Amino acid sequence: MKAADLAELTTAQKKVNALRLDFPLLNKPLTFGGKPRPLVYFDNANTTQKPRQVIGALVSYYENSNANVSRAIHSLGEESTRIYEGARDRVKSFLNAAHREEIIFTRGTTDSINLVAQSFTSLLKSGDEIMVTEMEHHANLVPWQMAAQSLGLTIKVLPFTDEGVLQIEKMPDLWSDRIRLVAVTATSNVLGTVNPVAEIIRFAHERGVPVLVDGAQSVAHQKVDVQALDCDFLAFGSHKMCGPTGFGILYGKKEWLEKLPPVQGGGNMIRAVWADHFETNVLPYKFEAGTPHMDGAAGFSVALDYLESVGLDFIYRYEKLLLAYTMDKVGDLPGLHVYGVAPEKGGILSFLIDGIHAHDLAAFLDTKGIAIRAGHHCAHPLARRLGVVSTARASFYFYNTMAEVDLFSDALREAIAKLS
């Protein structure tokens, strides 16, 4: 790690330590291995911790504003609707979307992608093709496979190198005039690779093909401007962004959302209903059937305020520095194998240590109060490409510290001594 980078990271600790005070779960001892220990939370690619501002917004909603939206005439219902629709405006601003109607509220990233996959099939026929990548999370792979099975589609897969770099130079060779959509992750949840999504979008658009971006691991870590990026769809979830669970976003260009049919029926998604037919509601409501996650919207709006107060540029830079510091601390461990060493990489470290199963390592670290993830990370094709069954994964966020990395490094060395 360069001296200037180390100095920058060290200086940032003061800001990070102040931010950590906002997170209740990071500031109380928990019991690990039979002893009270501070939590070292390195499972942020799975879900993030919640600041007291978001927790307070959820409590405030239930104590002061709880009522169903878009239905009631009474004051409480109008207040709840104001909060809910205000969250839509907040997301529009956060993404720099052109229209508030382009913001669809869902249950999460997976729900958002499934919505597009199920609706987009109305435009497809047997023999059409969908392009994905070899590093996709199951959430951006299985929905397209399901569509392929029901319609007779073909899935084309863009591979990645041993270093974890997506081989976009192979897109022309894999391309055909039957490709109808490209679905790509912005950042791999296993490799940490930050993909050149803008370049992929330009390539596809030159051929008249829309692109869906899985932003589950990117929107929380770097600023996304959907108009500049020019993606057709963007899916992401609140819970990886310091927000509530069970709440997500689908951004879609208005022209696409207008031509796609709804996939769920019920209240709110209709304009009028007769015994034998119905008329769909206008955007965004035609994709939001039933009672929505009102408290999730209230909490997520505050989470976005919080992230922007921290600074997305700060978050992205800080995570890269913390990852570099981690590699300096653990890079010389005997038997260490790191998966994903792309030049452009987020704060994710997937690894194995010779002689220690990933699950055993995660269980050992848990006794030290260190939370990581172990498994295939919902990416079976990627794991097969790497030739592994599972890996251990440490994933960072802006509230993690150098001191926590030091504890992590010491615990790994102890694990090697005791388990390998």
Image (cartoon, rainbow, N blue to C red):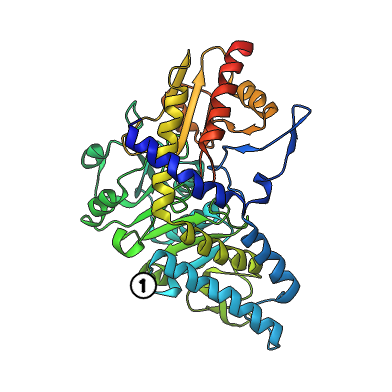
The x and y percentages for residue 289 are 60, 69
The answer to whether residue 398 of the structure is visible from this angle is: no
Q: Nearer the viewer, residue 77 or 369?
A: 369
At x 61% / y 22%, what residue is drawn?
361
Which residue is drawn at the image coordinates 44% and 46% (left, top)? 148
Q: Quadrant of residue 404?
A: top right
Q: Position of residue 400 (x, y in %)?
A: 54, 41
Using residue 194 as the reference point, say whether residue 276 is left or right of it: right
Where's residue 131, x and y in %?
Answer: 35, 45
Residue at position x 64%, y 66% from top? 293
Q: Secondary structure at mark 1?
A: loop
Q: Is residue 80 above or below residue 419?
A: below
Q: Is residue 156 above or below residue 417?
A: below
Give amino acid for label 1.
Ala
Number of disc labels: 1
Q: Is residue 169 left or right of residue 411?
A: left
| Quarter of image, res 84 | bottom right
Q: What percent of the width, then of the height, locates residue 111? A: 55, 55
Where does label 1 land, which residue? Answer: 98
Question: Quadrant where the N terminus lies?
Answer: top left
Split into 4 quadrants, where in the image is the C terminus? top right
The answer to which of 344 and 144 lies nearer the viewer is: 344
Q: From this viewpoint, which residue is outermost toward the right?
A: 34
Looking at the image, can residue 327 be seen? yes
**Image height check: is 346 above or below 306?**
above
The residue drawn where x is 57% and y is 54% is 242
Q: Residues within 10 Å of mark 1 (few under 14, many from 20)?
A: some
Task: Indicate whether 15 appears above or below 159.
Answer: below
